[in-house]
Amino acid sequence: TAPRMFRIAAIPADGVGKEVVAAGRAVLDALAEGSAGAFAFEWEEFPWGCEFYERTGRMIDDDGLDRLKDFDAIYFGAVGWPTVPDHISLWGLRLKICQNFDQWANVRPVQFLPGITSPLRKADDTELDWVVVRENSEGEYAGLGGRNLSGRGPGGEVAVQSALFTEVGCERIMRFAFDLARTRARRKVSSVTKSNAQQYGMVLWDDVFKRVAADYPDVETESVLVDAMSAKFVLHPEDLSVVVASNLNADILSDLGSALAGSLGLAASANLNPKRRFPSMFEPVHGSAPDIAGQGLANPIGAVGSAALMLEHFGLPDQAARLHKAIEATTAAGILTRDVGGSASTEDVTKALIDGLNA
Ligand code: NAI
Ligand code: MG
């Protein structure tokens, strides 16, 4: 029989995005090669990003979304470069894809890998394993607002940046979080709120959380203010399993989570369109890291972990587990990039990951 073919659009974009997407592709191709013809990946790479913007004045081709929409998935690097204002590059490419393809659930696992030193004193505990579920379509990143509303000009300018919370948006991300909790050893959902200060949107968030929780009596719940939750990430990470939060709060907490796991370079993420009307997008949590770009220093593990989330999305959990085992074998053997205390290059780690697939 013909191999199951997965068509993937690669968008490396900027900085280390290019290096880690190349690494992830190499590891996935090695995985497919070892599958004895069971599955294969067909790649198409797109040149969008800040260099493209400098040439064309656009972050993505006008027909870009149209060209992406029939792929099985999008494999994304990172967007942003000092030559282009960050709000233009981020809104012009990554947020554009997330919002137009209704990728409303952003899943960001935090796992503690063997051989990596975490700044967290309890991090040897194997139970430290949680997932941040980020509302990815509205909230603080709804793009609602405006500048210079006072009409007063320089010195007197006023800007408004509003957050949008809808009952439908809150409910679907919370149900997603509860369903995910049911697949995990610890069935618990922690909701992150700020309803003491944000009395409209976050109170709706809390109300929906209580209503949805009632449908999942087998799942333990808690509701924690975001400031307290940031302390809890550090002091009681063992008490977390699934953490559901709004767009901004989850963005911040997931960087904290990945730093606690040892480095931003380790953290994986999936932007899911759960109904599968549009392709989902898989990308490391980190940005384009201009400070280390082009030097072979980028840690490819976040990108490879994101590839594992893509395999799960494709219905290949055994293959995702093979990638995870290769990641653990690599870190346990001390083959580490500089961000996690080693001296291996991106290429060294990529090679070790590929070797680990066949171990
Ligand atoms: P960043 O994540 O690029 O870098 C933060 C720190 O983490 C830097 O010290 C960097 O060297 C390190 N780091 C990041 N990825 C690494 C990796 N794979 N291996 C080793 N070390 C790594 O965040 P920063 O500096 O705030 O932003 C840089 C650019 O990236 C900006 O233009 C920003 O807008 C963009 N960005 C894009 C994102 C995306 O495309 N999803 C997400 C976050 C930022
Ligand atoms: Mg972020």
Image (cartoon, rainbow, N blue to C red):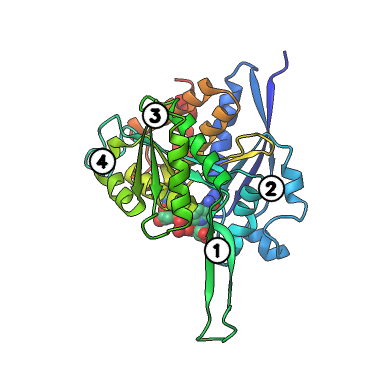
- Where is residue 147 shown, x and y percent of the image? 58, 74
Circle 2: residue type: Phe
User: Between marks 1 and 4, how big is the CA–CA gap?
Assistant: 34 Å
Check residue 86 in the rendering and tell me which mark sits there, or answer none: 1
User: Between marks 2 and 1, how big is the CA–CA gap?
Assistant: 20 Å
Question: Upstream in the sequence, badge 1 or badge 3?
Answer: 1
Q: Nearer the viewer, residue 61 or 69?
A: 69
User: Between marks 2 and 4, how big is the CA–CA gap?
Assistant: 42 Å
- Count of labels shown? 4
- Residue for point 71% across, 65% down: 57
- Where is residue 247 shown, x and y percent of the image? 49, 51
Look at the picture and state if 165 lies above or below 282: below
Which dot, 1 or 3, sits closer to the camera? 3
- Residue for point 72% across, 13% down: 1
Question: Upstream in the sequence, badge 1 or badge 4?
Answer: 1
Label 1 with label 3: CB-CB less than 8 Å: no
User: Between marks 1 and 3, how big is the CA–CA gap?
Assistant: 39 Å
Which dot, 2 or 4, sits closer to the camera? 4
Q: Is mark 1 within 8 Å of ligand 1?
A: yes
Q: Horizontally, is 260 left or right of 354 in the view?
A: left
Label 1 crowding class (10 Å Cα cut-off): few <14, some 14-19, many 20+?
some
